[in-house]
Amino acid sequence: MESKTVVLDSCKLMEFRPVTTAAAYLLPIIQRLHHHIRASVLAACEESSAAALAQVDHEGHDDTIYAIDRVSEAALIEFFERELTEPVVLIAEGLPTGELVLPAPATAAEARWRIIIDPIDGTRGLMYQKRPGWILTGVAPNLGPATGLQDIVLAVQTEIPLNKQHLSDQLWAIAGQGARASRTNRFSGESAPLQLSPSRAATIAHGFATVSRFFPGRRAELAALDDELVAAALGPIQPGKAQCFEDQYICSAGQLYELLAGHDRFVADLRPLLGPEMLCSHPYDLCTELIARELGVIVVDPWGRPLAAPLNVTTNVAWVGYANPQLQTHLEPHLHSALQNRGFVPD
């Protein structure tokens, strides 16, 4: 299992180590939270019909909240109120203002950490029992409202399996210390370490490479960009042949998992570039991208820069994942050319 090397100058290193060491104590607490949410959501999925879980509860800050989401949100608040020993700023979709300081009556200024959570990423696939969902948590030192994805030092990602699925994966990473994973049999409770390794292929030929276009609205533009990118990377279409494949997994964390597990080689979610009317990924959807990076996956913005978005529930985030540096070197110039051909330039 490869880990990405983190290079820091001596001054930053002195600041970096205490923060990551301090955050480590939160790992077992967050893992227990994820187990609690997973159990609650699985119970709801087994006891309720897909139609009931797919009922719209309300329209959230920047997304639709379904009945299944309410199950996980209730478990989240109850757990933190019981388990927390120091104030934190909790950031999650479904909270009245998108964030909440716990335990009351603490203030945001007193909090040491900002914890961003997506209790279910991949709601739409899970509520119809099509594909697993994921519980996501990222922990960053509290740097005020400017705290961003780039500040996350601890990330945990836990699979919510389908009813018919008995295995569930959990992944976690501490910045600069690599990533680990385990696979649990949810019926027996047995758990074992899991080795995950991104693809080492230098080309997308005969592999999965996806430009995300999940929802109605400007999908034709994204598909045309996808075709241009593949043609530039692999050459003209061969009659009767499939040069590469795609997987429209409606779940950012699921897409990251497919990259770090070696299933996918390239993912580009460019929806925010197409306009504010697009339903896009938000910081809580990508709060565990640290895990992928610690395993060697390249996760950047469309122009190759590190992701930088504030920890909130409304900012739209465009991102690109390359399974390894060779794929980035091969594909990134073609992606930039395709974007520039459509008038997109770095901000």
Image (cartoon, rainbow, N blue to C red):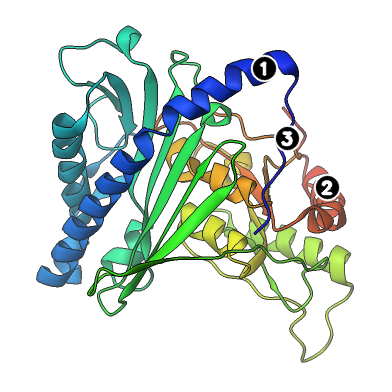
Residue 236, image x, y percentages: 88, 76
Residue type indicated by callout 1? Lys
Badge 2 marks a residue whose secondary structure is helix
Mark 3 or mark 1: which is in front? 1
Mark 2, other Cα within 10 Å: few <14 / some 14–19 / many ≥20: few
> Splitting the image into 4 quarters, where does residue 219 fall?
bottom right
Residue 284, image x, y percentages: 42, 39
Q: Mark 1 points at which residue?
A: 12
Q: Mark 3 points at which residue?
A: 305
Residue type indicated by callout 3? Arg
Tell me, yes or no, if residue 214 can be seen here: no
- Residue 148, numbered label: none
Is 338 positioned to the left or the right of 29 in the image?
A: right
Quarter holding the C terminus is top right
- Residue 341, numbered label: 2
* Mark 2 or 3, nearer chain start: 3
Residue 269, image x, y percentages: 60, 51
Q: Alpha-carbon distance for marks 2 and 3? A: 20 Å
* Mark 1 or 2, nearer chain start: 1
Is 19 positioned to the left or the right of 313 in the image?
A: right
Tell me, yes or no, if residue 72 can be seen here: yes
Residue type indicated by callout 2? Asn
